[in-house]
Image (cartoon, rainbow, N blue to C red):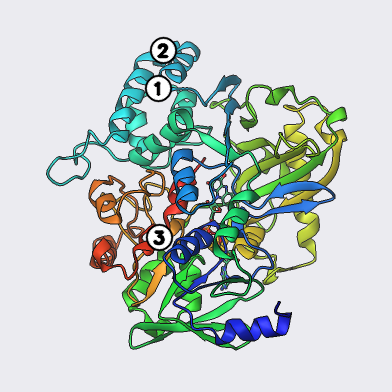
């Protein structure tokens, strides 16, 4: 056996084919495929544990999630694990969602025909609109609305979910439910909305029977069957630079100043982190750099994790569904409570008035498992950034402030879950800063590039696994711009021509929108990925895992 020191020397001296930056679920999946191809693969992560955002942490015997509460396309996930030889005994449980908002209470995880019937009952005057909506989204899902020649969406159809629903549905509550699978104003494009309904109702949201952390543990086994060999995961090894010479990757520099060489680097770090922090700006085309700097991301969340005493709480809310989308009843005649995130502090009651995802969390099959409840509200990164002093460093007021916000949310959810406040044994609060530092995600963004229709209106799919730097590949949600279509098993070439996603385009600013749009389009189309270009067959799988992990 190697001791720590000789192990360190070993990994420094080894000749590697590929370095993977990041031991998140995506980096580990990519590394597993490459190991299967017989390559010498080194995975580096700055955290002391594997898993990245899919990490599950422990507090006084309770387990709390750092990120995903579920995933979709279980058949594809299983296929990936089987291909890697680590799928034995992998079982999934369906996660059911319910909506409790606007004075309504109804299930969300039902087949289209049943959910449509539920909504027609609740909104008799909108019955025709509901029928038309589900008919239309079925077409979007099966791509029947694509122009057969260009394989792009019919240009005469509106792409904005909001625009489409405004014409179809009068009742604002129904519009919101159909447009966001929740309580928010519709914000995405129609294909993405259709895909989300498909996930919720047909494909389903799932949870591994062994718990979320089991995914990464299995992947670790696929990468490191033999310790200290030519396939390794090294933790506490942050990368500070991806070294590039004459447009080609040479290797990476670690936080301790050591350099490791490899002809290929796959970055599982956030897209922005990779291009704006890990690469020297002079190695990247300036237009590419600017496009990435300005491209908006999805928002982040504020999360309250509660370890509870099940004897002091009424958990009947979760009988039919372990996830509840909740919003306090309000009337559209009254002004909707909007949060002014530019204020240095927001009113906890204001935050509690927003849509709250209430989840009964944990592996219910484990006898010893303790009961946890997770509460999540959308949150603005910039608001919390004022409390950030550095990596994992916060100003003094931060702790108090986030606790007050959390207490506000708990008070609100206690209306829904009787006994909640008195049952709490432990409370742990995460903000966008936590998700930024723990997962290494820029701005703590939950799901890569913005999903807002207004941000990316393009009707062309874009492919960002290949980069302008030879030998550098991107691997995570933000490298595939149509993350919810479940096309991971197809070649990316096929994906490119068949995907209707109007996903990534540069945010259009009124003055120079056309030139910015074309800049982004040219950049990304130059990089269209052909399978034949890939150096190793295994690489085409990289980035795939995020596609199949998708939930609300
Ligand atoms: C709060 C939150 C909730 C989410 N909920 C869901 C959900 O319910 N369902 C769902 O499907 N998805 C959800 N997601 C998205 C989810 O995180 C992804 O599906 C998946 O976990 C992302 O995996 P990844 O490998 O792409 O990235 P990450 O898990 O973020 O991994 C990136 C890794 O790179 C490492 N890294 C970064 N920079 C460096 C560096 N310089 N040097 C070395 N290592 C570095 C990080 O430490 C990290 O381990 C959520 C995300 C967040 C933030």
Task: Answer with mark 1 or mark 3, whichever residue precedes in sequence.
Answer: 1
- Looking at the image, is 192 positioned above or below residue 178? below
Pick the residue in front: 101 or 480.
480
Task: Answer with mark 1 or mark 2, whichever residue precedes in sequence.
Answer: 2
What residue appears at the point 49 percent right and 23 percent down from the top-left corner? Answer: 110
Does residue 347 appear anywhere in the picture?
no
Is 127 on the left-hand or right-hand side of 306?
left
- Looking at the image, is 44 positioned above or below residue 512? below
What residue appears at the point 83 percent right and 48 percent down from the top-left corner? Answer: 61
Residue on which the image places disc 1: 170
Residue on which the image places disc 3: 479
Where residue 547 appears, as percent x and y from the top left, is: 43, 49
Badges 1 and 2: C-beta atoms under 8 Å apart? Answer: yes
Pick the residue in front: 225 or 68.
225
- Looking at the image, is 119 positioned above or below residue 95? above
What residue appears at the point 87 percent right and 28 percent down from the top-left corner? Answer: 311
Does residue 236 appear anywhere in the picture?
yes
Circle 1 residues within 10 Å: few <14, some 14–19, many ≥20:
few
Q: Considering the numbered disc 3 on the image, is that residue within a helix, a strand or a loop?
A: helix
């Amino acid at each position: 056996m190697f001791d720590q020191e000789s192990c360190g020397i070993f990994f420094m001296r080894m000749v590697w084919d590929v370095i993977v930056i990041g031991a998140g679920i995506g980096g580990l999946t990519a590394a597993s495929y490459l190991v299967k191809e017989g390559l010498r693969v080194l995975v580096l992560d700055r955290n002391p544990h594997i898993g990245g955002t899919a990490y599950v942490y422990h507090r006084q015997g309770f387990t709390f999630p750092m990120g995903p509460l579920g995933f979709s396309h279980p058949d594809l996930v299983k296929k990936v694990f089987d291909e890697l030889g680590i799928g034995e005994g992998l079982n999934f449980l369906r996660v059911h969602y319910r909506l409790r908002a606007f004075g309504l209470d109804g299930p969300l995880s039902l087949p289209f025909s049943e959910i449509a019937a539920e909504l027609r009952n609740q909104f008799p005057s909108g019955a025709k609109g509901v029928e038309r909506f589900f008919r239309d989204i079925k077409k979007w899902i099966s791509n029947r609305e694509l122009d057969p020649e260009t394989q792009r969406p019919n240009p005469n159809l509106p792409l904005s979910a909001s625009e489409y629903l405004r014409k179809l549905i009068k009742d604002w509550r129904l519009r919101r439910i159909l447009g966001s699978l929740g309580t928010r104003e519709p914000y995405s494009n129609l294909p993405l909305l259709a895909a989300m309904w498909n996930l919720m109702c047909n494909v389903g949201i799932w949870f591994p029977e062994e718990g979320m952390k089991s995914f990464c543990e299995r992947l670790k086994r696929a990468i490191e069957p033999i310790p200290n060999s030519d396939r390794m995961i090294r933790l506490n090894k942050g990368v500070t630079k991806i070294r590039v010479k004459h447009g080609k990757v040479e290797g990476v520099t670690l936080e301790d100043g050591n350099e490791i060489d490899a002809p290929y680097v796959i970055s599982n770090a956030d897209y922005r982190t990779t291009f704006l922090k890990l690469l020297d700006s002079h190695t990247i085309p300036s237009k590419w750099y600017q496009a990435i700097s300005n491209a908006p991301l999805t928002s982040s969340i504020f999360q309250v994790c509660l370890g509870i005493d099940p004897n002091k709480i009424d958990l009947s809310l979760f009988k039919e569904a372990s996830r509840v989308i909740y919003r306090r009843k309000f009337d559209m005649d009254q002004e909707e409570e909007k949060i002014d995130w530019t204020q240095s502090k927001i009113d906890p009651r204001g935050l509690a008035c927003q849509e709250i995802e209430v989840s009964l969390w944990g592996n219910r099959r484990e006898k010893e498992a303790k009961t946890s409840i997770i509460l999540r509200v959308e949150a603005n990164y910039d608001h919390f950034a004022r409390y950030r002093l550095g990596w994992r460093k916060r100003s003094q007021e931060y702790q108090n402030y986030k606790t007050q916000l959390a207490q506000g949310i708990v008070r609100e959810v206690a209306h829904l879950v009787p006994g909640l406040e008195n049952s709490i044994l432990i409370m742990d609060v995460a903000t966008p800063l936590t998700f930024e530092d723990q997962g290494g995600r820029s701005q703590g963004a939950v799901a890569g590039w913005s999903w807002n229709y207004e941000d990316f209106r393009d009707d062309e799919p874009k492919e960002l696994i290949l980069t302008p730097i030879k030998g550098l590949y991107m691997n995570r949600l933000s490298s595939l711009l149509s993350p919810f279509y479940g096309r991971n098993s197809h070649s990316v070439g096929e994906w490119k021509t068949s995907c209707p996603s109007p996903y990534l385009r540069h945010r259009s600013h009124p003055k120079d929108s056309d030139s910015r749009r074309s800049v982004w389009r040219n950049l990304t189309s130059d990089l269209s990925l052909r399978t034949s270009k890939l150096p190793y067959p295994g690489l085409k799988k990289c980035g795939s895992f995020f596609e199949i992990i998708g939930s609300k």
